[in-house]
Amino acid sequence: MNINRYIFLDIDEVLATTHQFYTNRKNWNPEYNRHRFDEKCVKVFNSIVETTNPIIILSSDWKRDFTIEQLNRIFEINGVNCKISDITPNLWGIQYKKLQDLDECRAEEILKYQVDHADVIDKWVAIDDLNLTQWIPDNFVRCTKASEGIKQSNVKEKILNILL
């Protein structure tokens, strides 16, 4: 039986770490006017993708600044070995407007997508630096160290435990 695995992916402090933000200007990519992804984070993410063959849904705020085509080009530039299939709905500025509600907004966007596509999603995980645990207790892995992102100790294992 083919299992449809989904990853709801944030970018900042998951693939693009604060280490990239603060080290030097060469980490800036003028093509998309943002910092390059952390190469070690990309390596870890590519390993997860290779192991689980997931469908990638972008939950990051980057979805408001780029099209899926542009985002896939950014992934390609940074060596990410998969494409984004879709993005979560944008509820920021509609249902949520206060900065202190950002975590809840992100969780609600992910849960709305998951519910709307429940008939095709078998296993899923949300990966983010925001704390979504209150709303997504069982399918969430948090990258708590902004300078390490997804390469942080035990993060990969937690993701694989949910998806496999």
Image: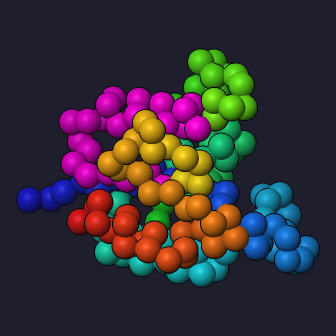
Range covered by the magenta-colored residues: 103-127
Quadrant where the C terminus is found in the figure: bottom left
| Residue 6 appears left or right of 141 | left
**Would you identify the image quadrant in which residue 24 lies?**
bottom right
Q: Is residue 29 above or below residue 100?
A: below
| Residue 60 appears left or right of 55 | right
| Residue 128 appears left or right of 6 | right
Furthest residue toward top: 95
Query: Which residue is located at x 51 percent, y 57 percent?
Result: 142
Q: Position of residue 132 (x, y in %)?
A: 50, 43
Task: Please say whether residue 105 is visible from this viewpoint.
Answer: yes
Task: Please say whether residue 113 is visible from this viewpoint.
Answer: no
**Would you identify the image quadrant in which residue 151 lies?**
bottom right
Q: Which residue occupies the foreground of this view, 21 or 53?
A: 21
Residue 20 highlighted magenta (yes or no):
no
Quadrant where the N terminus is found in the figure: bottom left
**Would you identify the image quadrant in which residue 158 lies?**
bottom left
Furthest residue toward right: 25
Furthest residue toward left: 1
Query: Which residue is located at x 54 percent, y 53 percent?
Result: 128
Q: Which residue occupies the foreground of this view, 8 or 99?
A: 99
| Residue 103 appears left or right of 7 | right
Residue 122 highlighted magenta (yes or no):
yes
Query: Which residue is located at x 82 percent, y 74 percent?
Result: 27
Q: Which residue occupies the foreground of this view, 2 or 44?
A: 44
Q: What's the image's color scheme?
A: rainbow
Total marks placed? 0
Q: Is residue 108 above or below residue 121?
A: above
